[in-house]
Image (cartoon, rainbow, N blue to C red):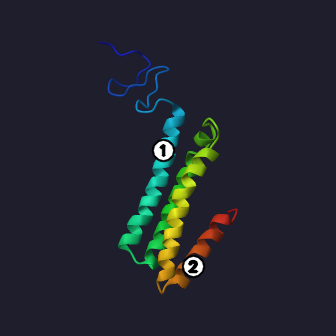
């Protein structure tokens, strides 16, 4: 059987108008799934780091993962902006998970004797995120 000209290979289906993301009915659901997966990974990382590291190490480690999350979010931002209804719906649905992770880190840190150091790290991190460069 000869493959149609618009396929890239016999093992990878890329048919005209048929979605190549077979498990997602629309492009929007694919974009939403990618975004929600990143948010879920960030929240799960907080739980894992908090369980396995002292607060003085868990907080900065999670903040570095947060930087990766922000970078990923910037990469898919144009796709997220094209989602029907705009990206605010996606951001609103993830806000609970992200703020929950931050709250858990802060509560754990406040119970420890290293709160001042962690607070210093968080302040520095927040300032860097807010700076235009």
Residue at the far top in the pictured view:
1
**Label 1, label 2: how many angstroms apart (C-alpha)?**
31 Å
Residue at the far bottom in the pictured view:
113
Residue at the far left in the pictured view:
1
Query: Where is residue 32 drawn, in percent x and y?
Result: 52, 42
Residue placed at 55% from the left, 84% from the top? 116
Q: In the rendered image, which quarter is residue 99 located in?
A: bottom right
Front residue of 6 and 116: 116
Q: Residues within 10 Å of mark 2 (few under 14, many from 20)?
A: some
Q: Is residue 67 visible?
A: no
Q: Considering only order in the chain, which callout, 2 or 1, is on the residue closer to the N terminus? A: 1
Q: Is residue 84 visible?
A: yes
Q: Residues within 10 Å of mark 1 (few under 14, many from 20)?
A: some
Residue placed at 44% from the left, 76% from the top? 57
Disc 1, SS: helix
**As drawn, 78 above or below 38:** above
Residue placed at 36% from the left, 25% from the top? 9
Residue designated by label 1: 34
Residue placed at 46% from the left, 79% from the top? 56
From the image, which quarter does the C terminus lie in? bottom right
Residue designated by label 2: 119
Tell me how many marks there are: 2
Query: Where is residue 130 drawn, in percent x and y?
Result: 67, 65
Query: Where is residue 77 drawn, in percent x and y?
Result: 60, 45
**As drawn, 127 above or below 114:** above
Disc 2, SS: helix
Front residue of 133 and 80: 80
Query: Where is residue 94 drawn, in percent x and y?
Result: 54, 52
């Amino acid at each position: 059987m000869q493959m149609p000209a618009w396929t890239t290979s016999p093992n990878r289906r890329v048919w005209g108008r048929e979605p190549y993301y077979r498990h997602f009915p629309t492009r929007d659901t694919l974009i939403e799934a990618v975004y929600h997966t990143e948010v879920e990974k960030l929240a799960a990382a907080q739980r894992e780091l908090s369980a396995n590291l002292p607060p003085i190490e868990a907080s900065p480690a999670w903040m570095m993962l947060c930087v990766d999350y922000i970078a990923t979010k910037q990469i898919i931002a144009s796709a997220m902006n094209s989602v029907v209804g705009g990206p605010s719906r996606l951001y609103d649905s993830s806000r609970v998970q992200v703020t929950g992770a931050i709250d858990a880190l802060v509560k754990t840190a406040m119970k420890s004797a290293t709160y001042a150091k962690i607070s210093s790290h968080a302040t520095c991190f927040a300032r860097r995120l807010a700076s235009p460069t």
